[in-house]
């Protein structure tokens, strides 16, 4: 419950940031603003859910982020997002946001395995130290199959850039 409140507060702060911050030019290079050392980051996150994460920068300000999460007794799913990332002026922080998809298997009982397909979004903040990225994000999700159901996830994590 406390984690959801912290993530909700983070979302509100990020929304205020989007409203009050002037747009940043796409030509601005994240690497010159203490961005990632390379284009491929691998790490993990703890939260709801916990799992292994991979981030691939395609160009400055645009990345693909993937999460594989599991609870061996209840679920396995993959989450993928296209993220638009911008530096926060006069700060080591960046903010990011973007749409995504969910694909997974939920198993609530011995004969209840179901395919889960849905859409999601992600909004968060991060910063880079050498070859490491520290991040905090909120992930609203909407399952479409097998039935329509919404919830929030998110987490805090660390990625190492190869």
Image: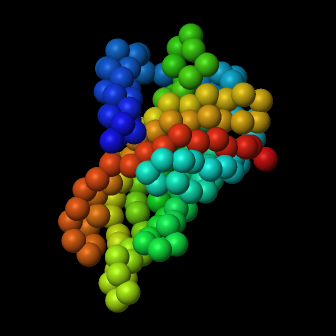
Query: Is residue 84 at all visible to an observer of this figure?
Result: no
Left or right relative to 130: residue 136? left
Does residue 9 lie above or below 70 as drawn?
above
Q: Name which residue lies at 62% across and 34% down.
A: 134
Residue positioned most to the top: 90
Q: Nearer the viewer, residue 39 or 9?
A: 9
Residue 96: x and y in percent read: 48, 35
Quadrant showing the N terminus: top left
Residue 102: x and y in percent read: 40, 63
Residue 55: x and y in percent read: 62, 49
Q: Classify residue 144 by image quadrant.
A: bottom left
Left or right relative to 39: residue 99? left
Q: Name which residue lies at 72% across and 36% down.
A: 132
Q: Name which residue lies at 34% across and 76% down.
A: 108
Q: Nearer the viewer, residue 147 or 94?
A: 147
Q: Classify residue 154 by image quadrant.
A: top left
Coloring applied to the structure:
rainbow
- Number of numbered discs overlaid on the protein picture: 0
Residue 140: x and y in percent read: 33, 48
Query: Is residue 112 at all visible to an observer of this figure?
Result: yes
């Amino acid at each position: 419950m406390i984690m959801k409140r912290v993530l909700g507060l983070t979302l509100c702060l990020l929304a205020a940031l989007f409203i009050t911050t002037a747009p940043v030019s796409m030509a601005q290079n994240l690497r010159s603003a203490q961005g990632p050392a390379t284009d491929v980051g691998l790490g993990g996150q703890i939260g709801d859910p916990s799992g292994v994460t991979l981030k691939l920068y395609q160009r400055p300000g645009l990345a693909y982020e993937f999460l594989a999460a599991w609870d061996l007794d209840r679920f396995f799913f993959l989450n993928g997002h296209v993220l638009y990332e911008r530096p926060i002026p006069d700060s080591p922080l960046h903010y990011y946001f973007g749409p995504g998809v969910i694909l997974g298997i939920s198993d609530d009982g011995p004969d209840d395995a179901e395919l889960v397909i849905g859409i999601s979004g992600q909004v968060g903040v991060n910063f880079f130290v050498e070859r490491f990225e520290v991040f905090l994000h909120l992930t609203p999700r909407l399952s479409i199959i097998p039935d329509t159901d919404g919830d929030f996830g998110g987490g805090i994590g660390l990625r190492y850039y190869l």
